[in-house]
Amino acid sequence: MTHRPPQEQAATARAMGHVAYQHCETCGARAAFLRVLCPVCGSTDLTVHHSAGRGVVYSTTTLRTREGARDVSLIDLDEGVRVMGTVAGVPPEDVAIGLPVQGALDPEGGDEPRVIFTVERDG
Ligand SMILES: [Zn+2]
């Protein structure tokens, strides 16, 4: 694993539309937000990985603005990382805890990209 700066690795992940997370090679901690030091053990031996984007809804909120309602959820990814995102394609009221979702970065998101999740259908 190469040790490029985390921002650079994350930029590469974003360019590919991947959800990135950081893995501490010293203690194994994982974090969705990119840091210079491990938040658990303080190690600088951190690598950036791409999530497959699959997860389940941990908590959900409906955000109501003048533009309308949209979902803001915390999603537990299969890799063990919790990220904030928006579940799209269904009414915000229909987003439920435990719902299986598949996420990808919003290509319009710029430097602070949002993760857009869609509901995983069975079969
Ligand atoms: Zn650590």
Image: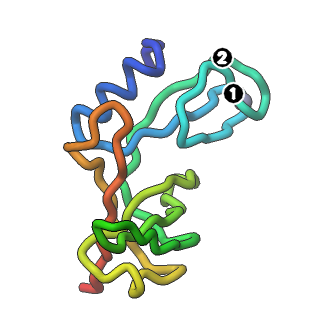
Q: Is residue 63 left or right of residue 68?
A: right
The answer to which of marks 2 and 1 sits earlier in the sequence is 1
Task: Please identify the quarter of the rendering in which residue 7 is found.
Answer: top left
Q: Image point 31% across, 83% down: which residue?
A: 91
Q: Assess mark 1: CB under 8 A from ligand 1? A: yes
Nearest the camera: 65 or 102?
A: 65
Q: Image point 38% across, 79% down: which residue?
A: 92
Disc on res. 13 = none
Q: Image point 61% across, 19% down: which residue?
A: 36
Q: Name the spot of residue 100 as percent of width and height, x first.
A: 41, 75
Question: Height in image: 15 above or below 104?
Answer: above
Q: Assess mark 2: CB under 8 A from ligand 1? A: no
- Residue highlighted by disc 2: 44
Query: For the residue labelled by badge 1, is the local secondary structure a helix, a strand or a loop?
Result: loop
Q: Name the spot of residue 90 as percent of width and height, x first.
A: 28, 81
The quarter of the rendered structure image containing the C terminus is bottom left
Q: Is residue 94 left or right of residue 120?
A: right
- Residue highlighted by disc 1: 38
Question: Height in image: 84 above or below 4?
Answer: below
**C-alpha span from label 2 to label 1:** 6 Å
Task: Please identify the quarter of the rendering in which residue 95 is found.
Answer: bottom left
Nearest the camera: 85 or 44?
A: 85
Q: Which kind of residue does numbered mark 1 sit on? A: Cys
Q: Are marks 2 and 1 in contact (CB under 8 Å)?
A: yes
Ligand 1 rendered quadrant: top right
Question: Height in image: 90 above or below 22?
Answer: below
Crowding at dot 2, Cα within 10 Å, few <14 / some 14-19 / many 20+, comes out as: some
Crowding at dot 1, Cα within 10 Å, few <14 / some 14-19 / many 20+, comes out as: many
Q: Name the spot of residue 66 as percent of width and height, x first.
A: 33, 67
Q: Image point 67% across, 37% down: which residue?
A: 28
Q: Which kind of residue does numbered mark 2 sit on? A: Thr
Question: Height in image: 15 above or below 90?
Answer: above
